[in-house]
Amino acid sequence: MPLKSRITGTGAYVPERILANVDLEKKVDTSDEWIYERSGIRERRIVRKGESNSDMCLEASKMALEAAGTGPEEIDLIIVATMSGDMPMPSTAAILQDKLDARNAAAFDINAACSGFVYGLSVADNFIKTGASKKLLLVGSELNSRFLDWQDRSTCVLFGDGAGAVVLEPTRGSKGILSTDLYSDGSMWDYVCLPGGGSSHPPTRQTIKERLHFIKMRGSETFKVAVRTLEKLVVDTLLKNNVKVSDLAMLIPHQANLRIIQATAKRLNLPMSKVALNMEKYGNTSSASIPIALDEVVRAGRIKKGDYVMLEAFGSGLTWASALIRWG
Ligand code: ACO
């Protein structure tokens, strides 16, 4: 049997502070009804002053390592999927390596925005399958709140902070990650973007005045592409693996919008009881949403050994990605 990778531990962390829709009503011209009806979000978590992205990574990672029964020194590679790292350099993965004292691990970040965790899972899977890594820590973590324009009601109501982590190890059985599929269409790069702060628009008085250092989104255009793309993504992944929709025990989608998820489930004829949801509590936590939801379903005993579990994500780039896992 060829080498596969399997998830041997999961963990998640969200900050304590809750920012509810009703609190946002006091900041911008919005309402709890509008936000909940249009997105499915009721509240989100926001970091405390001084708390960093790598701090969130650390908490989620400690839980995942404990669940996997492994010490940090056994990890040989740390990958952090993030678009809101502590700083442009070094990578947040390097800072996490220090905080975790994972002294034998190489470390790097990847950025595929909201698809980041599934992209990271694909990279991780290939490191394990080729034998290049024996024990890998993959984290999806976002500190979105510091990149939100709290005067822009079309974006600030949607996002939240949080982190999720998994430990991956090799296996030769029938279980593990069966396939990962990654896609992008950069012609729509400006549908969701954060234009300021990079080398195109380094910080100046003008870029700050133009509020370029905040997330911008063309919401309804992005919504339409997401709905069109995600059904095909799931169907193609299942076909490739000879698995039927009815065989799926759990779909763990990126948590951007409940209506996108419901539309995908309806088109697939998949009951919502088989779909993991957490955006009501946490909003869109970008690359953290899937690993947080995965940790929740694992800890709640909603998936068991041998179950088919599908992860699917869609985000800035535009990017989209899926992973099919036989749990165990
Ligand atoms: N409160 C009240 N009204 C609002 C708010 C708000 N917070 N925000 C926008 N509106 C208004 C708009 O101004 C607009 O008013 P108008 O008709 O008078 O112009 C109206 O509500 C409708 O706005 P739309 O943007 O068309 O609303 P839509 O139904 O598309 O919902 C949403 C918006 C929730 C953003 C949705 O489009 C969405 O979820 N899009 C996809 C998001 C996504 O998947 N992003 C990718 C991942 S993110 C990443 O990668 C970082």
Image (cartoon, grey):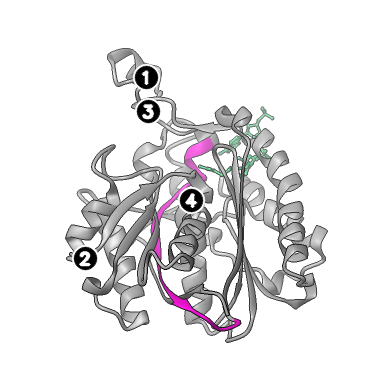
Residue that mark 2 sits on: 104
Q: Residues within 10 Å of mark 4 (few under 14, many from 20)?
A: many
Badge 4 vs badge 3, beta-carbon distance below 8 Å: no
Q: Earlier in the sequence, mark 4 or mark 1?
A: 4
Please name which of the two marks, 3 or 1, marks the residue nearer to the observer. Answer: 1
Q: Is any part of residue 285 visible from this angle?
A: no
- The residue type indicated by label 4 comes to Gly
Element type where label 4 sits in the image: helix
On whether residue 79 falls in the magenta region, the answer is: no
Does label 1 point to a residue whose CB lies under 8 Å from ligand 1? Answer: no
Residue that mark 3 sits on: 213
Q: Residue 82: where, in percent of width, then height?
A: 40, 48
Boundaries of the magenta span: 155-174
Residue at x 82%, y 66% (from the top left corner): 269
Q: CA distance from mark 4 to mark 3?
A: 20 Å
On whether residue 160 falls in the magenta region, the answer is: yes
Relative to 314, 165 lies left or right: left
Toward the viewer: 108 or 262?
A: 108
Above or below — where is 256 with respect to 102?
A: above
Residue at x 62%, y 30% (from the top left corner): 188
